[in-house]
Amino acid sequence: MKILIIDDERSIRNSLKEILSDEGYDVDVAENGPEGCAMVEKEKYSVIFCDIKMPEMDGIEVLDRLMEMGIDSAVVMISGHGDIDTAVGCIRKGAFDFIQKPLDLNRILITIKNATEKVSLMKETKVLKKKVYGQEMIGESAAILHIKEMIDKVAPTDARVLITGANGTGKELVARNLHQKSNRSAMPYIEVNCAAIPSELIESELFGHEKGAFTSAIKQHKGKFEQADGGTLFLDEIGDMSLAAQAKVLRVLQEKKLSRVGSDKDINVDVRVLAATNKNLKEEIEKGNFREDLYHRLSVIVINVPSLDQRKEDIPLLVDYFIDRICDETGMQKREIDSDALQMLVDKQWTGNIRELRNVVERLLILSGDRITVEDVKAYVY
């Protein structure tokens, strides 16, 4: 584990480094704030000790800079002139702890232990969030930058969003990012694939049922709306929902209350609804398959996710991302892809969009040699 000490007093720097090195830690030192910030930009530290009273750039300024950098390190402020207001101010700015001089070895070691546990927990939380919510959207094309901008604007609101686009374009990822960046991010995020649930069960799945409501209802069941209370409900493939279920969804959106199947008791719910479809809902309305009033309730904001063929400039970034992700997940050895092989992937038509591209990259990683070549692409893709 690496520790950085930022202190303008040489005796403090060296003695603290010697003590912590004897405890088995890998320790670097910096004699001022600018030097310390420069070191943090190049190296990852688990814990950073920073003195407050320093020339050029005091410890508070260093703390502000470190927080702007978005580091994962635990920052511990140290000072011989500490008071409660200074300590509280540092903690509010993002410091992990505040220690007064003269430094006590036991206090320092306990602080390091607690700080590393916090850093480890933060990393585990980030990994968990990535598993639950997915990654940021990969790409720098104009279309993807527009979607990212839309997400940033819309996410903090409670506006309902209709996400449109072909299968495999990443509509679910847009929904997860909307939730993750919303004020409801700490509350449940519930997904429902409306196309995967039989029409006779969709109402029970969404609104729940009471014991005995139908033959197989052996106990009370809370529906997805109740499960998502306070959070976000993502209705994927909303265009495949039955008209009867659409009517009940409309009621929940209008009145913010529902009743379980087999009950006439109203239950209040506070849910933000996001919906997605690969169908043209306006055409479905004309055919009588989708309620126009529900469409207008769901489409306060419409985000259309482009096909992969409409954003080919993002394919190199996506290929690099999938290579790293798949190798990390499976333990496969990472390998490079030749530029002409990559160009073949860019030139290919992707009817299955990003989902197809990921499968192709995984296939190439499994079947290719030390590098992914043109021959590999010809043999396993075309």
Image (spheres, rainbow, N blue to C red):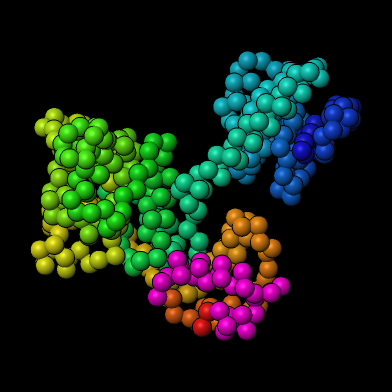
Q: How many labels does the image show?
A: 0
- Which secondary structure type mostly characterizes the magenta part of the structure? helix
Find residue 44 and report its horizontal and vertical position in percent. Answer: 72, 44
**Quarter of the figure that contains the N terminus:** top right
100 or 160, which lies in front?
Answer: 160
The structure residue drawn at horizontal position 82% and vertical position 34%, both measured from the top left corner, is 25
Q: In the shown orientation, is residue 62 left or right of residue 160?
A: right
The residue that appears at 26% across and 53% down in the rendered structure is: 197
- 93 vs 144, left or right, is right
**What residue range appears in magenta?**
351-380
Q: Is residue 344 above or below residue 352?
A: below
Instruction: Write the residue at 11% across / 32% down.
Output: 264
Residue 308, image quadrant: bottom left
Residue lying farthest front?
Answer: 215
Residue 290 location (% of width, % of height): 15, 59
Return the residue nearer the eye: 194 or 88.
194
Is residue 369 inside the magenta stretch? yes
- Asked if residue 304 can be seen in this view, the reply is yes
Q: Quadrant of residue 207?
A: top left
Nearest the camera: 199 or 292?
A: 199
Residue at the image position 68 percent from the left and 68 percent from the top? 335
Where residue 339 appears, x then y in whole percent? Answer: 63, 79
Regarding residue 310, the answer to whether it shows in the image is no
- Spot occupied by residue 93 in the image (x, y as percentages of width and height): 58, 30
Residue 258 vs 81, above or below: the answer is: below
Q: In this view, does 44 lie above or below 48?
A: below
- The answer to whether residue 313 is magenta is no
The quadrant in which residue 304 appears is bottom left
